[in-house]
Amino acid sequence: MADRIRVLLVDDHQVVRRGLRTFLEVQDDIEVVGEASDGDEGVARAEELRPDVVLMDVKMPGTDGVEALRLLRERGNPARVLIVTSFTEQRTVVPALRAGAAGYVYKDVDPEALAGAIRSVHAGHVLLQPEVAGALLTDDQNGGAGRGPALTEREREVLGLIADGRSNREIARALVLSEKTVKTHVSNILMKLDVADRTQAALWAVRHGVTG
């Protein structure tokens, strides 16, 4: 199927990769295209295979998940990265989100929930639990981003809808604008926030209380 979501698994434990693959192989719309056992290999495989979504562990020997995320962003790899972790501490998850992850799930996640999470981040949504959003906000208040750049009222409206996971078409419909105008607003928002993509813009919006 040409429209399948192509997924790369990156985890240093083979049993975890095997379990994830078993979960996903029964999904009609998801295809596991490769595996990697550490961050360096994960980056190389992501560059080679160009998956839609990468399931990435955080704690791995050598290059960990956070550094791998940074490398992917530096190389302009468009894959959406979903952190799959056994660590619940905010100090583990928050750096991954700041590095560009689209969200995270725990390794004991229900198979259907995992498939749903993959579909969600592939569609442009950000999976951010309330306690982690709070941690991001607290981190900013303790010396992070400060007040941020000045956005116009329309840009704040568009940003709020981006944070809700809306596509440009859905934003255009909601605000009664053309898609071309929305695209221009999105480009201006990314430039003003100095972020690389919609995921980072959505995280900024959550941290600063901008909602649709």
Image (cartoon, helix red, strand yellow):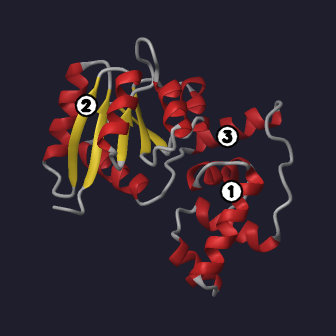
As drawn, 26 above or below 41 = below
Give the CA distance from mark 3 to mark 2: 33 Å
Pick whichever of labels 3 and 1 is earlier in the sequence.
Answer: 3
| Residue contact between numbered discs 3 and 2, judged by CB atoms under 8 Å | no
Q: In the picture provided, is 62 more to the left or to the right than 93?
A: left
Camera-side mark, 3 or 1: 1
Q: Amino acid at mark 2?
A: Glu
- Check contact, mark 3 vs mark 1: CB within 8 A: no
Q: Is residue 108 visible?
A: no
- Nearer the observer: mark 3 or 2; the answer is 2
Tell me the quadrant of the picture where the C terminus can be found. bottom right
Q: Is residue 30 left or right of residue 87?
A: left
In the rendered image, which quarter is residue 185 located in?
bottom right
Q: Tell me what residue is drawn at x 22 percent, y 20 percent.
A: 14
Label located before the other in sequence (1 or 2): 2
Where does the image place residue 78, in percent across and percent down from the top left? Answer: 45, 49
* Residue type pointed to by label 1: Leu
Residue furthest to the top in view is 61
Mark 1 touching mark 2, by CB under 8 A? no
Foreground pick, 83 / 114: 83
The residue lying at 51 percent from left, 38 percent from top is 75
Q: Which mark is residue 35?
A: 2
| Residue for point 43% across, 41% down | 81
Looking at the picture, tell me which residue is in the foreground, 163 or 107.
Answer: 163
Say which mark, if any, is on residue 190. 1
Disc 3: which residue: 134
